[in-house]
Image (tube, rainbow, N blue to C red):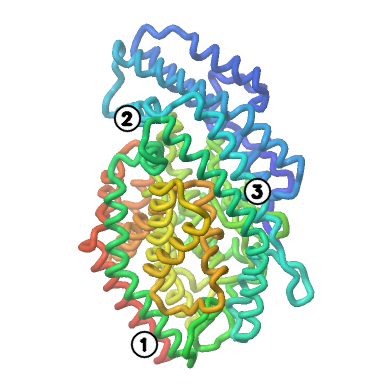
Amino acid sequence: MGSTVKNTLDFRQLPSYVQRRFVPQEADLTDLKGVQSLFDRLLDRRIESSQDLENFVLDFSELDAAIDQQGTILYIRMTCQTDDEARSRDYQNFIEKIVPAVKAFEDQFNRKYVSALEKYPLDEVRYGLYTRGIRADLELFVEKNVELQTKVDLLSQKYQSLCGAMTVNFEGKERTLQEMSKYLLEPDRDLRERAWRASSRRRLDDAKKLDNLFDEMLSLRNEIGKNAGFANFRDYMFKSLHRFDYAPEDCRQYHRAVERLVVPVWAGILESRMKQMNLTQLRPWDTAVDPLGRAPLKPFEDVDDLVAGCQKIFNRLDKGLGAQFSGIRKEDLLDLASRKGKAPGGYQSTLNESRKPFIFMNAVGVDHDVRTLLHESGHAFHALACANDPLMDYRHGPMEFNEVASMGMELLADGFLGVFYGREDLIRSRINHLEDIVFTLSWVAAIDAFQHWLYENPKHTAVERKNMWVEIHRRFNGGIVDWSGLEEEHAYLWHRQLHIFEVPFYYIEYGIAQLGALQLWLNSKKDLQKTLTQYQKTLESGGSKTLPELFKAAGLEFDFSEGAVEPLMKEIEKELKQLARNETEGP
């Protein structure tokens, strides 16, 4: 599949967003001595007024952004080609040498900042949230954890490499697992089953390696939490992720709401699918194919067509968004096609000094690829909207709202998907999207509940872990899909979720944000322009407001109780019924 891809992936032509005032332009931020020298200069500075303190903060933010961008570039290069030894080595060197030093210096900065703040106060409205985060980080920092965190980061890189190397020989050709997902959309049930089994067998080949890898991560993380004085790593991570506005019990409230209100809807979707397919058993390879036996949706031939189509959508949705996406294209900040050696999944990562977004994904020519690019573009628009803030900490919002930006963009763009589809296929795509939202809310509950169990029970065995995953998955999967004879595949299904390995506890955000995005969608059906204006204005705030304030500014409620979930699920069911009628009636 063709691709709009940066060939050099060095980003040297991207200028700083503003001219550096503290970090020398020629500074080598992969050189440990050079980085140490810059921090020493900054930390030795005398602070004798509030203006001095503010300049101290702004110069630190500049240095932090420059170093962060260097690490981001190395990460992007590594994930774009995990089998390139030089790229892996460069990233590993940065993780082993630069990141631990920076963490120690950041703690020194935090201490100096809080101490100086007592003498020279800053504007509470402007710096209140910034200070709150720093105080939390101060309480968390333990020097002996730096080495442990470095080990975890290196294990995360190993996970990327293991997954990036997974290919299967199928239908006479070596294919990535991302490419194999296309076959699950084929009407030929035998073909789907063979593809599903081939991919699953390949994952099971490395199941022991991944299990051992996770055991190492688990042990290190438990030690990190204990060193910081927490009962478990879960509680440590809630503070580390700056979750000031909700607690573990709120997550359990989300789990209960999903179990009572979302899972029955998902079960109904699966039961309807089984009837439409004239099946007595719904197997794992039957859940993505069109239930009426139609050929897979094919929105584009190659990645350039995908990009061009999304450009048209953004142009029609909002001229400003269209111009921003055009800029991303012109600066080659995209790597979208799946290929051997490329890390799985998709992400948007901000180059924090140039304040530009980079989008990574594994497009293979299916409907989901369109949603993924819309999703990651939502993140990109968010990064660009708050790029003007001089504080790097405010140039991104809380993750729960960051995902509203991306999931919301998928739904706001829904009315313009005709650039990819005719009437019949457009209806199919919309049905797929709404059903996927229902699945996502359930899957998030399963992954989050599983992660809570993992770290609340740190001494569990691998066998206990497998059994608990199956129990939790059954609680949230609707009970319709038949896994008989596939017990090992079922027990290791969680291995596919990279968040469990790489970013623990970063997953409930998707559920919270999906509820926000659904509210955005309902608002847009009443008044698209007003909703879009509120959305864009709120993106500009970045992290300078609290999570509830951001939701409110966008016209949404920060609430994931049963009372909040129920009307959203009713609206989805209503919309799905209307789409089904439209599909039956024809043009």
Question: Dot 3: within a 10 Å radius of its alpha carbon, few (fewer than 14), some, or many (20 or more) residues?
Answer: many
| Residue 1 in view in this figure | no
In the rendering, at what x and y percent does residue 263 appear? Answer: 34, 71
**Amino acid beneath label 2:** Arg
Camera-nearest residue between 530 and 21 = 21
Q: Which residue is mark 1?
A: 581
Instruction: Please state which of the two labelled residues, at mark 2 or mark 1, is closer to the viewer.
Output: 2
Cα separation, mark 2 vs mark 1, equals: 52 Å
In the rendering, at what x and y percent does residue 148 appear? Answer: 54, 33
Secondary structure beneath dot 1 equals helix
Instruction: Give above or below for 53 relative to 460.
Output: above
Q: Which residue is mark 2?
A: 132
Cα separation, mark 2 vs mark 3, equals: 33 Å
Secondary structure beneath dot 3 equals helix
Cα separation, mark 3 vs mark 1, equals: 44 Å
Circles 2 and 3, Cβ within 8 Å, touching? The answer is no
Q: Is residue 289 left or right of residue 89?
A: left
